[in-house]
Image (cartoon, rainbow, N blue to C red):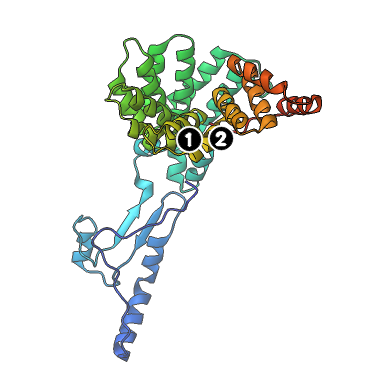
Amino acid sequence: MKQRAWAFLADGEQITALSLGNNNNNDRKSRRSNEKYKPQERRHLEVCGSRCNFTVTSAPRRTESTRRSRFDTNASSSQIAHHDFSLLPFDVLAKVAASFTLSNLQSASLVCRSWRDALRPLREAMLFLRWGKRFKHGHGGVRPNLDKALDSFLKGAARGSTLAMVDAGLIYWEIGKKGEGIALYKKAAELGDPAGQCNLGISYLQAEPSNPKEAMKWLYQASVAGHVRAQYQLALCLHQGRGVESNLAEAAKWYLRAAEGGYVRAMYNTSLCYSFGEGLVHNHQQARKWMKRAADRGHSKAQFEHGLSLFSEGEMMKAVVYLELATRAGETAAAHVKNVILQQLSATSRDRAMHLADNWRALPSR
């Protein structure tokens, strides 16, 4: 919503070109015609407090036929194209903006008074959403209170915010009321919210009995919208043949897309696809690249695998750091290899490796 909206001519219309002839009589007539209709054109082009009018006038002369053609969907090139976005029904605008963040709602509310009034419930929902997050996580000087968090999210959901619907659905799912959670996910999903679509798809996979086909439908919609967790889950279903026949090439495509979007588990699986040539052409360099990216973002198995790779290449110090990180994350097999390497290092090198591990911080991931 930060981008400015531009009005375009309707399909099939043409902008009438100005005459470039030297006929003085025609010039005088043209000037008189333009002077006669300039006030009306200014009224059409005005963006007033309560209406948002974007008008392109394609011919200066008005006739009875052009007046009639304003309401004719098959109008000729001489009609006036009039797009009044303030007349967009409130319920339609509310559905379009249901998944908007606060900043997008604030921008949309500045378009005109009509939009500002229509989006007031969603702006109120953002306040309830903020308080819900405070109560859920104990931020902003309040103590964690799941009941108050749920109440705030439900109030935001009642005002049409899909963001609040998803957060309320999460709490319902966490406290065991999965039916209520799925109902809220579905409502958000049907309004086009990618997080709601993703959560609904995962819920169908985890439900008893599961519904893989319905899960695939919603995961695909969220994946196309760019939701990286949905892309990873969709890849898993394609890889394992849940809801569809197993398709390694398609699974690898979605693993890679999610990895490029910053999803750390997808980075690890993408590395394996390149390493074993499953769904992707075997490429050791790409496999190493994605394994390191996953390791640097805290994936314990990737840290173990990358540490082994460094050990095989003689990079003892770096290998110890990654193996130590994997050990601390619970990869017990990494501890044995790490101890073997430590015996080959000097005391100074061992201390240096432990210092690097102590001060290591994971890169941001999704």
How packed is label 1: few (under 14 Cα within 10 Å), some, or many (20 or more)?
Answer: many
Quarter of the view holding residue 318: top right
Question: Does residue 328 appear in the picture of this structure?
Answer: yes
Q: Residue 54 location, x and y as percent?
A: 38, 57
Residue at mark 1 to residue at mark 2: CA–CA distance: 9 Å
**Residue 86 position (above or below residue 57):** above
Q: Residue at x 48, y 33 (%)?
A: 271
> Mark 1 against mark 2, which lies toward the viewer?
2
| Contact (Cβ within 8 Å) of mark 1 with mark 2 | yes
Report the front residue among 18 and 287: 287
The local secondary structure at tag 2 comes to helix
Name the disc covering residue 259, or none.
Answer: 1
Residue at the disc numbered 2 = 293
Residue 141 image-quadrant placement: top right
**Does 361 sit above or below residue 96?**
above
Q: Which mark is residue 140?
A: none
Tag 1 secondary structure? helix
Mark found first going from the N terminus, 1 or 2: 1
Q: Residue furthest front?
A: 344
**Residue 33, image x and y in percent?**
32, 77
Asked if residue 161 shows in the view, the reply is no
